[in-house]
């Protein structure tokens, strides 16, 4: 039985998103890895680096970039967006306002684009953003994991 996820999309190519992408590549978790970020130059760099590394891996993995709304064929979407780095004295809850705005702009686009896979939330504050994604997506709670 093939238990690999066919296509994984990582939304947010900062430190967490890039680390997730390299882990997926190293463990041959999927057949296609798609990176999404507003910073197109950053994403292009990660795609090139990952593609170079993929050439030395035993499996075949395609690495590309696209918009979050182009997601109808995606099995798992990993949300790693952040509202910005914390300043001294701030807590993870201080990230909520900006991160929630970003998520509110992304998830409806994805649902309009036909996404029906699993959301994996890896951003802070995780529980609140996971709840927000669940509500915005309208997906069963078994498809939204934080």
Image: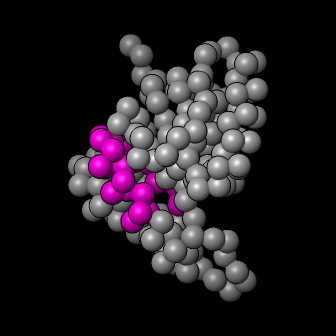
Nearer the observer, 81 or 88: 81
Nearer the observer, 114 or 23: 114
Q: Is residue 61 above or below residue 74?
A: above
Horizontally, is 5 left or right of 36 in the view?
A: left
Give how far across and how far down residue 93 sits, in percent.
52, 78
| Residue at 35% across, 65% down | 132
Horizontally, is 44 left or right of 37 in the view?
A: right
Horizontally, is 39 left or right of 1 in the view?
A: right
Q: Is residue 61 above or below residue 37?
A: above
Quadrant position of residue 49: top right
Give how far across and how far down residue 60 sits, in percent.
61, 16
| Residue at 57% across, 70% down | 83
| Residue at 63% across, 83% down | 90
Magenta region includes residue 25: no
Give how far across and how far down residue 39 sits, in percent.
65, 55
Q: Is residue 77 above or below residue 5?
A: below
The answer to whether residue 76 shows anywhere in this view is yes
Q: Is residue 44 above or below residue 107?
A: above
Q: Quadrant of the C terminus?
A: bottom left
Nearer the observer, 100 or 142: 100
| Residue at 33% across, 44% down | 113
How many marks the image carries: the answer is 0
The answer to whether residue 16 shows anywhere in this view is no
Colour pattern of the rendering: one colour
- The magenta stretch spans which residues? 103-123
Give how far across and how far down residue 25 sits, in percent.
64, 30
């Amino acid at each position: 039985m093939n238990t690999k996820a066919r296509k994984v999309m990582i939304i947010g190519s900062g430190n967490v998103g890039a680390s997730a992408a390299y882990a997926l590549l190293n463990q041959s978790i999927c057949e296609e890895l798609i990176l999404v970020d507003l910073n197109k130059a950053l994403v292009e760099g990660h795609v090139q680096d990952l593609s170079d590394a993929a050439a030395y891996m035993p499996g075949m993995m395609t690495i590309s970039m696209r918009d979050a709304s182009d997601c109808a064929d995606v099995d798992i979407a990993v949300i790693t967006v952040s509202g910005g780095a914390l300043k001294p004295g701030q807590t993870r809850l201080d990230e909520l306002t900006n991160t929630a705005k970003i998520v509110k702009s992304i998830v409806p686009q994805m649902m309009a684009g036909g996404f029906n896979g699993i959301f994996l939330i890896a951003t802070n504050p995780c529980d609140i953003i996971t709840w927000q994604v669940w509500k915005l997506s309208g997906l069963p709670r078994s498809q939204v994991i934080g």
